[in-house]
Image (cartoon, coloured by chain):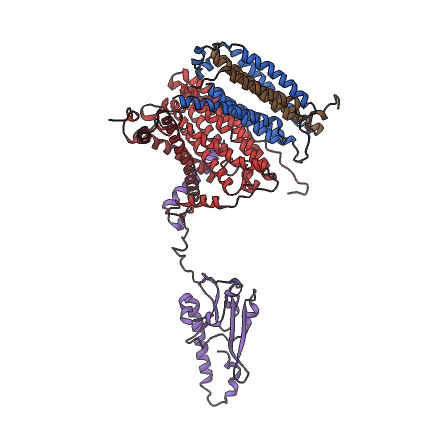
Chain colours: A purple, B blue, C red, D brown
Amino acid sequence: MTVFGWGVFKGMMVTLKNFLTSYYRKPDEGGIFTVQYPEEREKKIENFRNFPFLVYDETPGKIRCVACGICERECPTKCIHIEMELDATGKPARKPAVFDIDYGLCMNCGMCEEVCPFDSIFMDHVFEITAPERQTGLVRHKDALLKANEYFQKIRPTLASVIDQKRKAAEEKKKAAAAPQPVPPPSTGGPTQGAV
Amino acid sequence: MPILEMAAKFGVYAVMGVILIFALGVVTLRNLFHCALCLAAALIGIASIYVVLQAEYLAGVQILLYVGAVVTLVIFAIMLTEHLAGKTVRQNNSQSPLAIMALLGFMALIGTVIVKTPWPVTPAALASKVSVMGLGKALMGAYVFPFEVISILLIAVLVGTVIIAKKDTPERS
Amino acid sequence: MIPPMLRGIEFNVDMIFVTAKAWILSLLAQFLPAWLLVLASIVISGVVILCLGPVIMMYLTLLERKLLGRIQNRYGPNRVGKWGLLQPIADGIKMFTKEDIVPANADKIVHLLAPIVIVVPALMVFLVVPFGERMTAVNLNIGLLFFIAVSSITILPIFMGSWASRNKYSLLGGMRTAAQMISYEIPMTLAVVPAIMMSQSLSTNTIVLSQVGDYDLHWYIFTPWGIVGFIVFFLCATAECNRPPFDLPEAESELVAGFHTEYSGMKFALFYMAEYMNAFTLCAIAATLFLGGWQGPFLPSWLWFFGKTFLLICVMIWFRGTFPRFRVDHLMGFAWKFLLPLTLLNILLTALWQFTSNLAAWFWSILILGISLWTLVKLNRTFVPEKRHYPMGN
Amino acid sequence: MIVLPLSHILIFSLLLFAIGLYGALVRRNIIGILISIELMLNAANVNLIAFSKYTSLAPETGQIFAFFVIALAAAAAAVGLAIVLALYRIRKTVYTDEVNLLKW
């Protein structure tokens, strides 16, 4: 037999319990889990992705990107712009001369990171970006995008280690393939030479 | 404290003047909603006159009943009947000059009566204070019969109003 | 030499405000004529109330947002000031600086008058509230009637506000608010009658004094009719100041903001202030009538008064954190078909309570209350339409 | 305790009554007439209270009569407005001179 007002009483008890427990319960079991943003920071999650950046191995000169343009085509918001560098003879030098990403347009989807065959573009953890002017202020040129491999290892240790092993293995395989047959003329190694 | 006395008396005359102005507003304003608001203001003024005449309980009842209920009723009626079209409609009919003359005559007659007759004002009456307890006893004592008749009448009015105002929708089968 | 005003007041924490006022008056007495002193004491009380009202309103808004936050597992505002204490001031500045938009074909005068006319009764009610021993601003012997009459005036400015802004939503909101406030005013007035009957007077001070007793068991809430009266009065109080779960008229989801849709800036702040001050005074009167006003064992009287009122306001906020909104017909049905008969029966109970002995009185009054509640619930069984069957199958 | 000469209050209520009467006679809108009648009733109330205060009859009589007048005025207003609503629903008008046919 439903006593009149019993549901009302139960409802009030729920909110009262919630009110009281919010004072002493710890965040993960029912307490208040709000993070006071500027003072406290959320603990870093490795796969948190924000604007892309380019990786270089030792010196900014040895950039991994070969300006193949796959990410430029794949980017849904078309915010990447690449121009191939031409060496003295006018042949493409497999290096990007100009590599612009418009952070204003980029929606942090991470497509460029997935499609990049040369592990050269990854998503960063830096999200507090401001610029004085909206249209042109947020366009990042190549030198602003370049970051060292150590930084990449620091922010995404697991992924970075996997990629480094892969690159080292490719390195050994290439060196092994190149070393044992010093005799055959260098012409056969032409097509794989660019796979670095 | 003669100054306070004199200031209070002046205040009462001022309130009376304000009430008369609001009353004129009730009668002459074109927009009926403004009339109802002037009526509310006039009634609150009259409640303050009751306080001056040491009938506080009645002032409270007056505000509660008149301003709280009757004026709200009038405003409900205005809202339901006044279509918002701002068509300027002649508010008063043609007999207004005739009515004014008749009223002036009526006022002159009653005015002279008021001023001329020596009212039996007794200082004892001025001093007597009506307590709420006294009112209750009188209502329950000497005036208990009209009190009951009024309650029956109010119930009759309640039922009557609902029946008249109810939209007579055809009885759903 | 104690100045004449101060004689007869014992100096302890309880009388701190009374002595403060008397001391100020004794200071003024040196260079003011006698009759001006009377005005001075009126002015002092007036200034105190005029400051008390808005400050209470500001910190009620903060309290509400803090408690609601805690109920919903988040902090309330804590950015402006130490624990968000300066938040009301920030809100106030925001309200002042906001642009004051008046709709094009609105009725200018009435649009301007409405917020003013709604704040005046909200402030006037403070006169009658007994803040502590000998701390009622004006000791009217028709205190309670004054309170009910003044709080019944608030229906008018709501009409003015909704009619003047020439907007369908505000007109609908205004009509609903007026209907709700009228239908909840009657049970509220009748819920007050038992307290008046038992204390033989309308003045709030004597009502509090009539609840004096050892161990404070003489509060009216510790009697069967007191409990019922308190619950009904408190429900009607929440409905009277349009607070959830009775806040249909200004329900954001349905009527944008009810009657104060077309108001912004300072005028909206006045509407907002009037609502919160009404909430405070209604809780104060509920505490005075049923919880023994400033009665309390050790603490000074005004501390007891503010504690009880604070407790009741927290319950109102608690309601807001818990309950969904009433539907219009349930809202009206609840007032007319449930609360009104209950209060009438409550008055009968108090009458019988006065003449019978204590123990037996408890027994049969609970009996009567139980039976009447049961019948009322049965009578109010909500009309359940017969199950609708769809031709195409469900 | 403010003591006004009785005749001043009577003149005030006479003026109020005259204004109410003028409104009732002259106004075209039925609700306007009803409001003016309220004014006239209030003028009568003021008179009742003034006499009960100043002359030595039993002091409560004036106030009790005033209660009954208020109750009756409320009842009259309620029924009057109900009739106005019914009239408005049928004839779509609240102006007295447009409602002059005895049979509609």
Q: Is residue C306 above or below residue B160?
A: below
- Percent position of residue C276, x then y: 46, 36
Toward the viewer: D103 or C356? D103
Toward the viewer: C299 or C67? C299
- Percent position of residue C191, x then y: 47, 25
* Residue C304 appears in the picture as rendered: yes
How many numbered circles does the render carry?
Answer: 0
Rendered image quadrant of residue C123: top left
Query: Image quadrant for the N terminus of chain B?
Result: top left
Query: Image quadrant for the C terminus of chain B?
Result: top right
Q: Is residue C240 above or below residue C341?
A: below
Residue that lies at the very extreme toward the left in this rendered image: C1
Toward the viewer: C298 or A182? C298
- Percent position of residue C100, x then y: 53, 43
Rendered image quadrant of residue C14: top left
- Percent position of residue C363, x then y: 41, 21
Taking the image as shown, residue D26 lies to the left or right of residue C259, namely right
Taking the image as shown, residue C329 lies to the left or right of residue A40, namely right
* Residue B158 appears in the picture as rendered: no
Rendered image quadrant of residue C382: top right
Question: Which residue is drawn at the image coordinates 31% and 29% (left, top)?
Answer: C30
